[in-house]
């Protein structure tokens, strides 16, 4: 019988890990319609007199930062960020009301915890939206660092560093699990073992190009690497 050496490798990394960090949207629950949300934030920013060139290529929250930096009027800059942040938060919370975690998300988190893993979530979403979609998430893991909880938001590596410090986790013994290329690049930058999943925004080639060590159909498949107790 031929052994699957690739599976042997990622199974071993999951078993040996002390901690696992998860993205949220697209990883533990379905993605927001990010293109639609970005379009709305961009439209608001243009309506306040900021040219597209001032924020082209930026992530959604960072559009507001770039727009505010471009404006000469401090009051106008403050109003743009306030109104834009409210737009993003309201959109996230409304979407979360009709969103539920993936079917195997809770089971996977429970299995990893039962095998002694410290678990954390790092997300660009606001905390209220995350908990609206997954009300018991904080009972299922050891730390949730949402947008409201950090000064430096991923892709800033300090978001990841804060999560590692919270879990008291060594990067070399930690997995980064996410559906986005951003998550893979972030984990790679700090030496984490990067697990891409295909339930969100990226395909396998994109995830691997961004630094994924392994790509799985879904985050719940991590449980396949765990030893099965007698009687299970």
Image: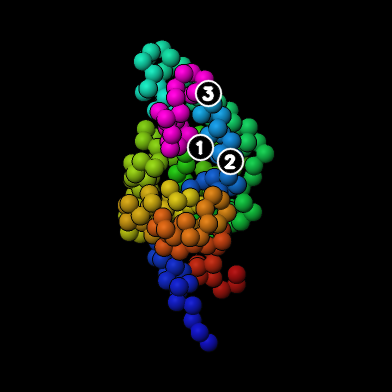
Mark 2–mark 1 Cα distance, whole angstroms, equals 10 Å
> Which is closer to the viewer, label 2 or label 3?
3
Q: Earlier in the sequence, mark 2 or mark 3?
A: 2
Please provide percent x and percent y for residue 192.
36, 56
In magenta, the rendered stretch is: 44-63
Q: CA distance from mark 3 to mark 1?
A: 19 Å
Between discs 2 and 1, the one toward the N terminus: 2
Residue 80 got which mark? none
Residue under label 1: 125
Query: Of helix, strand and loop, which one carries label 1?
Result: loop
The residue that label 2 is drawn on is 32
Label 3 belongs to which residue? 44
Q: How many numbered marks appear?
A: 3
The residue positioned farthest toward the bottom in the image shown: 1
Q: Quadrant of residue 35?
A: top right
For residue 18, above or below residue 91: below
CA distance for labels 2 and 3: 19 Å
Nearest the camera: 12 or 180?
180
- Neighbour tally class for label 3: few under 14, some 14-19, many 20 plus, Cα within 10 Å: some
Asked if residue 38 can be seen in this view, the reply is yes
Helix, strand, or loop for circle 3?
helix
The crowd level at tag 1 (other Cα within 10 Å; few <14, some 14-19, many 20+) is many
The structure residue drawn at horizontal position 42% and vertical position 30%, both measured from the top left corner, is 53
Residue 171 in view: no
Kindly indicate whether the residue at mark 1 contacts the one at mark 2 (C-beta within 8 angstroms). Answer: yes
């Amino acid at each position: 019988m031929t052994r699957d050496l690739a599976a042997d490798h990622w199974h071993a990394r999951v078993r040996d890990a002390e901690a696992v960090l998860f993205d949220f949207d697209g990883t533990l629950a379905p993605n927001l319609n990010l293109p639609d949300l970005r379009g709305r934030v961009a439209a608001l920013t243009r309506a306040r007199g900021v040219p597209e060139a001032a924020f082209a290529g930026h992530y959604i929250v960072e559009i507001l930062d770039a727009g505010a930096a471009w404006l000469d009027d401090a009051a106008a800059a403050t109003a743009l960020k306030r109104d834009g942040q409210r737009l993003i938060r309201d959109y996230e919370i409304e979407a979360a009301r009709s969103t539920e975690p993936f079917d195997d998300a809770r089971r996977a988190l429970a299995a990893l915890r039962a095998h002694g893993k410290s678990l954390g979530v790092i997300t660009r979403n606001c905390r209220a939206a995350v908990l609206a979609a997954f009300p018991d998430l904080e009972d299922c893991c050891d730390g949730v660092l949402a947008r409201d909880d950090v000064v430096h938001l991923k892709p800033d590596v300090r978001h990841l560093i804060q999560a590692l410090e919270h879990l008291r986790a060594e990067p070399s013994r930690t997995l980064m699990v996410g559906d986005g290329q951003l998550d893979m690049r972030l984990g790679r930058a700090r030496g984490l073992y990067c697990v891409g999943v295909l339930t969100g925004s990226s395909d396998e080639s994109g995830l691997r190009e961004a630094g994924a060590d392994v790509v799985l159909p879904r985050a719940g498949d991590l449980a396949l690497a765990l030893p099965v107790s007698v009687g299970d």
